[in-house]
Image (spheres, helix red, strand yellow):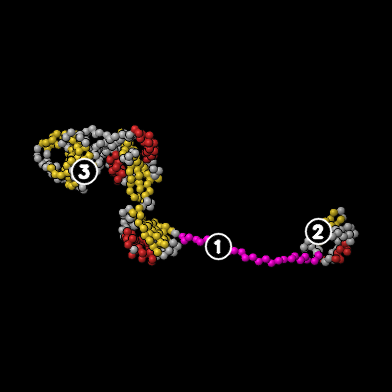
Amino acid sequence: MLAVPNASSTELFATVSTRKPSILAYRDVAGALARVTLGQWLFTALLAGGAVAAFALVPDDEPIDVPMTAVVRDLPLPVAAAREPAVYWHDEHVERGDTIGSLLARAGVDDDAAFNFLRTDPSARALYQLRPGRALHLATDDSGDLVALRFLQPSGAMLTIKRDAAAFSAETSAAPVETRVEMKSAEIRSSLFAAADDVDLPDSVTLELADVFGGDIDFHHDLRRGDRFSVVYESRFIDGEPAGAGRILAAEFENRGVTLRAYQWTADDGTSGYYSEDGHSLRKAFLRAPLAFSRITSGFTSARFHPILKRWTAHKGTDFGAPIGTPVHVTADGIVAVAGQETGYGNVIIVRHGKTYSTVYGHLSRFAPDLHAGTRVRQGDVIGFVGMTGWATGPHLHYEFRVDGEPRNPVTVALPNAEPVPEAQRARFAADMARRVAQLALARSESGTTFAAAD
């Protein structure tokens, strides 16, 4: 038993059931202690003014039965979404000595069915025309099986091989071409081609650059160390791989302190040309020279010692030294008057350009295919090839520029210009030039930058 001090005082006992609370108040301490055991007591004594308060836990009444009902329901299981097989693309570049088998093995392809199809199907034979540097695009699954393959053929067509269930199919189609705009700028230190190579400018763009400014700059004699050029041009890509350069959109050439600019523009009738910002055509009616790059071995003069006749005679043309087979370009639009042999000239072509002008091309090794008297030619067309036929001591081109039948010095004669932008198209020309001028300014300041084409 537990003795409680001051038992005669008024005490309060509180009991709490394990199920629900209840409060019991007793004045008779002895009677309360008689109803509970020691193990059921939990109390706290507070001594204040001789009074004691005690709290205890006591058992509650009988447990309450709670009715329960079992409920069983069939719940639908969630259906897992079908997962597409994972596909992994690989880009493999052809290396010297590669075969289609070694390329597939390097890409992790382990697929007998694919190897058998590529080996036996005639449509896949283009894959055996592998050239170093070309790309092969392959898609495989988790198991290493071939899912798809793309290959740009040397012809420019795209070969696509796909797997459908267990079978393969091959298709050849025109390759989609992506056009980007590239901008380059360089300084002349030794030659135009050396400067172009320094900034990875394609040769075709370098040749066109010389052609654009060929009417104002003699690239054989006028270039000086420190001259500069900037060019904006198109670059073509197929399936992410370079596929050649396109046209020049804008160009600038600083030669001997004089800055020349050219902007490409296409008229309503579809004809394209290069113009200054104010709409004047930069194309001369005649090119200064019929060869892209060469050297003058004998100039226009009234007195020259002839190497074959062994006497002093007038030389009424300009001789350009070049290897046999070098292409010869007609210097202006016109109609072929003569394509044959003449004493002294050897194989010669004479082209008439209207009533006033004509040009002569002598000592040719051969003529361009299908060229004959009456053929209409356009400026820059290849009409023949350098040779040493007729009275010639070495391979070169003899070129004459005639006005009303009289030879003139093609290096110094004033050449007429082509027609400017028509007045009716000036507004559209001005709008197009605003974009070209901005591109050229960017090329001048940001050399070597590549931008996606917006045209």
Q: Which residue is mark 3?
A: 375
What is the secondary structure assignment of the residue under circle 2? Answer: loop
* 278 vs 338: above or below: above
Quarter that holds the N terminus: bottom right
The residue that appears at 31% across and 46% down in the rendered structure is: 202
* 199 vs 131: above or below: above
Q: What label sits on residue 207 in the rendered view?
A: none
Q: Which residue is mark 1?
A: 79
Q: Is residue 50 left or right of residue 320?
A: right
What is the secondary structure assignment of the residue under circle 3? Answer: loop
Which numbered disc flags the more N-terminal residue, 2 or 3?
2
Q: Is residue 299 magenta?
A: no
CA–CA distance in space, label 1 to label 3: 76 Å
**Tag 3: amino acid:** Thr
Crowd class of label 3 (few under 14; some 14 to 19; many from 20; radius 10 Å): some
Which numbered disc flags the more N-terminal residue, 1 or 3?
1
Which region shows up in magenta?
A: 61-86
CA–CA distance in space, label 2 to label 1: 61 Å
Give the foreground label among 1 and 3. Answer: 3
Give x and y (percent) for residue 439: 38, 39
Q: Nearer the viewer, residue 125 or 185?
A: 125
Q: Is residue 347 left or right of residue 184?
A: left
Q: Is residue 231 visible?
A: no
Q: Which residue is mark 2?
A: 44
Which numbered disc flags the more N-terminal residue, 2 or 1?
2
* 111 vs 437: above or below: below
